[in-house]
Image: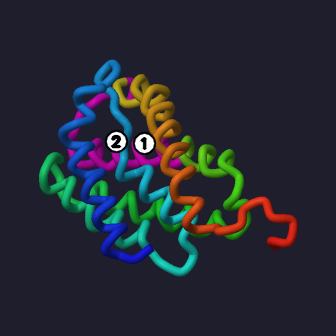
Amino acid sequence: MNYRLATLIFFLAFLCQASLLNLVAILGTTPNMILCLVIVFAFLYDQDNFGIVLGVVFGLLYDICYMPYVGISAMWYFVLALCVMFSREILNKENIGTVLMMTVFGTFGFNFLTWCSYWLLGDKTSIMTMLKCQPLEIAWNAVFVSILYAVVIRRVIKHRRDRFYQ
């Protein structure tokens, strides 16, 4: 995969997240497609830094378009991508369970750190408001990551489950 294709995928996710996903929202909750792309790309692509670079770029773009403060999402996407990249050294890429586990922790961590940042900047949204949306958003993100992982893993690892593959 090259940066053009990865940028196109992130751009389509950005457009869908901002417009189309609101049509399928359950209890006002939709998947965070950019977060899911950051997790999957940072975990699966060793040589390229798609997750970090495009996470920061589209995090800034999302903040500029839809958030009251610019840079919060980009900063936490960057931190999340770094954590995922460090964890891929000890976790198995070919196991979807590890990616789903990182999705659960990544979703909760990203949302909690974003809430903390907004709270420090003066937003008085209750933590309970953020916490009550977490189970549904984690489920949405897990479904999206499962589909994305099934598509992307075939491009990254050509011969999965081959007995001669090390």
Highlighted range, magenta: 106-128
Chief secondary structure of the magenta span? helix
Q: Is residue 107 magenta?
A: yes
Query: Would residue 117 be found to the left or right of residue 142 on screen?
Result: left
Image spot of residue 165 (x, y percent) = 80, 71
- Look at the image and tell me whether residue 85 can be seen: yes
Q: Mark 1 belongs to which amino acid? A: Phe
Image spot of residue 130 (x, y percent) = 37, 30
- From the image, which quarter does the C terminus lie in? bottom right
Image spot of residue 72 (x, y percent) = 28, 56
Disc number for residue 115: 2
Query: Which sits in the foreground, 68 or 14?
Result: 14
Query: Would residue 1 be found to the left or right of residue 53 on screen?
Result: right
Q: Is residue 108 magenta?
A: yes
Image spot of residue 75 (x, y percent) = 34, 62
Work out whether 64 lies above or below 19.
Answer: below
Disc number for residue 112: 1
How far is disc 1 from disc 2 in space, using C-alphas?
5 Å
